[in-house]
Amino acid sequence: MDRNIIHLDLDAFFVAVERKNNPKLNGRPLIVGGSSRRGVVAACSYEARRFGVHSAMPMYLAMQLCPDATVVSGDVEAYSQHSHLVTEVIADSAPLFEKASIDEFYIDASGMDRYFGAFQWAVELRQKIMRESRLPISLGMSVNKLVSKVATGEFKPNAEKLIPAGTEKEFLAPLSVDKIPMIGKQTSSFLYDMGVRTVATLREMPPKFLVSAFGKNGLSLWNKAHALDDSPVVPYTEQKSISTESTFEEDTIDVKRLKSILIAMVEKVTFQLREQKKLASCITVKIRYSNFDTETKQVHVPYTSSDGFVLRTVLELFDKLYNRRLLIRLVGVRLSGLVFGNHQISLFDDTEEDINLYEAIDYIKHKHGSDKLMRATTLGVGRRVRMEMNMFNGRIIKL
């Protein structure tokens, strides 16, 4: 039996929420993001995109391309509330659904009597979402998550697209390789340099060559080029927090060591946060003394997944928390108050370089493992290392 996998994606979600709250913005070029010259574009309307504006673009360049655009700073709370509303509508109707991000959902409609019946049900659900949320949303449907997502992206906004079973490879073949999910700027640039520009050409590449060039992601690229994807729709559950802690074999009072461990913990939990496309609004540090007394200190912060911001906050909390000068047997870090989003939302006032750095670090960790790239202070070396450098697609990344 063929699977029936539906992909739903809210059209220009941040822009749509801003326009719902302020109808005067309708029809005008609109940019959501940092208002300073060094800020970046988090999202933009289709009117602004016609001028070449796109997400993660430096704000000063976006304003040069589209000087008449209206810029708003964004409201993550409002976006989270509207995302929750759409989630509730889907939960009331869908037999099995996954919330992939703040504005993106998958539904497994396999087992319905007829394929057309499943698609018609999806179309009716889309209409219900738009009626109850007053937000635009597009859908794609096929036998797997990969092709459904590509279909939504290819035909949105206002898309309702069915890719019939057996036509997946034909649909993907003429598309640019950067239309495949998880192929970012660096990977697509590398493929372009090799003369691989379409999915059809990528399909002809030997799997061994792709593995040698891209590591474990090489086989994934080959499978995606052949429209192969058996990943399941993961039932949606609300995750309350992401945390990690460490109990030492011997109690310690070495503050330098303790802070190095906290730094490693922050790198771990913020990477997990970004991998899950989430932001946190509460940071907690925990310590347990040798006498088993346990103390915690937390602070509420603007939604973030930034290593640097979380790290500064964790170290400040630790300095305030550790005042008894007793031996410590455990330390921990917890991020809570989670919402779906990505670090571009939280970095409204960060620079293009900051965003590129996070993307590069996450790419390396995703490709080679989260333990392959870390700050020098977490390596256990005795001397201070001024700078750690990693080559990433011809660029030097300074940590």
Image: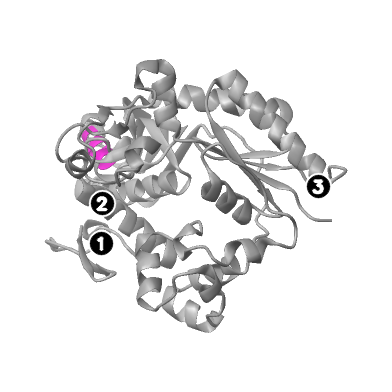
Specify few, some or many for label 3: CA neighbours under 10 Å numbering under 14, 14-19, or 20 or more. Answer: some
Q: Which structural element holds mark 2? A: helix
Q: State yes or no: discs 1 and 2 in contact (Cβ < 8 Å).
A: yes
> Which is nearer the N-term, disc 1 or disc 2?
2
Q: Which mark is residue 115?
A: 3
Q: Please state which amino acid type lies under the numbered disc 2.
A: Ser
Q: Position of residue 387 (x, y in %)?
A: 15, 62
Is residue 72 placed above or below 216 in the rendered structure?
Answer: above
Q: Magenta stretch? A: 309-316
Q: Is residue 245 visible?
A: no
Query: Would you name the residue on which mark 2 appears?
Result: 260
Q: Which mark is residue 296?
A: none
Left/right placement of residue 371 relative to residue 62 reads right
Label 2 or label 3, whichever comes before in sequence order:
3
Q: Tell me the tag on residue 380.
A: 1
Q: Nearer the viewer, mark 2 or mark 3?
A: 3
Give the class, few, some or many, for how many residues have Cα within 10 Å of label 1's Cα (few <14, many ≥20): few
Secondary structure at badge 3 equals: helix
- Under mark 3, the amino acid is Tyr
- Report the amino acid beneath label 1: Gly
